[in-house]
Image (cartoon, helix red, strand yellow):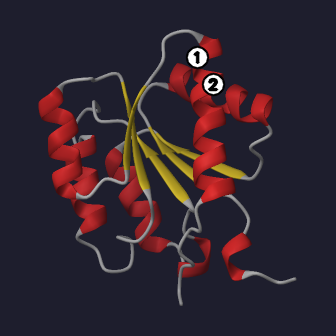
């Protein structure tokens, strides 16, 4: 069956810490979350890439760190959620911050979920397993360009 909601998994990770990215990539493999994974190490790089992509190439999910130099995660989230073409892409904050003000601010802007980065790799794997189960096995994601 050709179900438009079962499109290939594409994930954009926006994080300036390449060690965190490597841990995520290893955890994706470990839990069987396959598909296209792209890393942007700055918020501006992510926005520039998204602006140039066709609707059919947009990611299924964005994992966004808050604490980045220059254009931080709050600013990126605000730009994503105010752009008609990009605002339906689910965004999950993936950050070290558990600050209540950060959490509340992200939800006010329109984030879809907020997750705190685990420190221990086994916990990263467990978080990615839950992320996979929810975002790619439970919910129906929006189709782009429809």
Badge 2 marks a residue whose secondary structure is helix
Residue 71 or residue 102, whichever sits in front: 102
User: Horizontal and vertical percent for residue 51?
Assistant: 41, 71
User: Horizontal and vertical percent for residue 58?
Assistant: 54, 69
User: Residue 126 got which mark?
Assistant: 2
Mark pair 1, 2: CA separation: 5 Å
Residue at horizontal 61%, vertical 79%?
56
User: Horizontal and vertical percent for residue 29?
Assistant: 78, 33
Image position of 83 with respect to 91: above or below:
below
User: Residue 123 got which mark?
Assistant: 1
Residue at horizontal 35%, vertical 22%?
96
User: Horizontal and vertical percent for residue 61?
Assistant: 53, 56
Badge 1 marks a residue whose secondary structure is helix
Q: Single out the residue that lies furthest toward the right.
A: 1
* Apparent side of residue 56 relative to residue 116 in the rendered image (left or right): right
The quadrant in which the N terminus is found is: bottom right
* Apparent side of residue 103 relative to residue 122 in the rendered image (left or right): left
Q: Single out the residue that lies furthest toward the left.
A: 101
């Amino acid at each position: 069956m050709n179900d438009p909601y079962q499109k290939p998994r594409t994930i954009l990770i926006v994080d300036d810490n390449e060690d965190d990215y490597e841990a995520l990539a290893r955890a994706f493999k470990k839990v069987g979350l396959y598909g296209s994974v792209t890393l942007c190490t700055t918020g501006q790089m992510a926005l520039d890439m998204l602006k140039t992509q066709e609707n059919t190439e947009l990611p299924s999910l964005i994992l966004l760190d808050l604490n980045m130099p220059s254009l931080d995660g709050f600013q990126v989230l605000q730009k994503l959620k105010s752009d008609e073409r990009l605002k339906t892409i689910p965004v999950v904050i993936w950050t070290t911050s558990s600050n209540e003000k950060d959490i509340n601010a992200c939800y006010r802007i329109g984030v879809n979920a907020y997750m705190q980065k685990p420190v221990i790799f086994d916990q990263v794997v467990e978080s990615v397993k839950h992320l996979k189960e929810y975002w790619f096995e439970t919910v129906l994601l929006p189709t782009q360009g429809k």
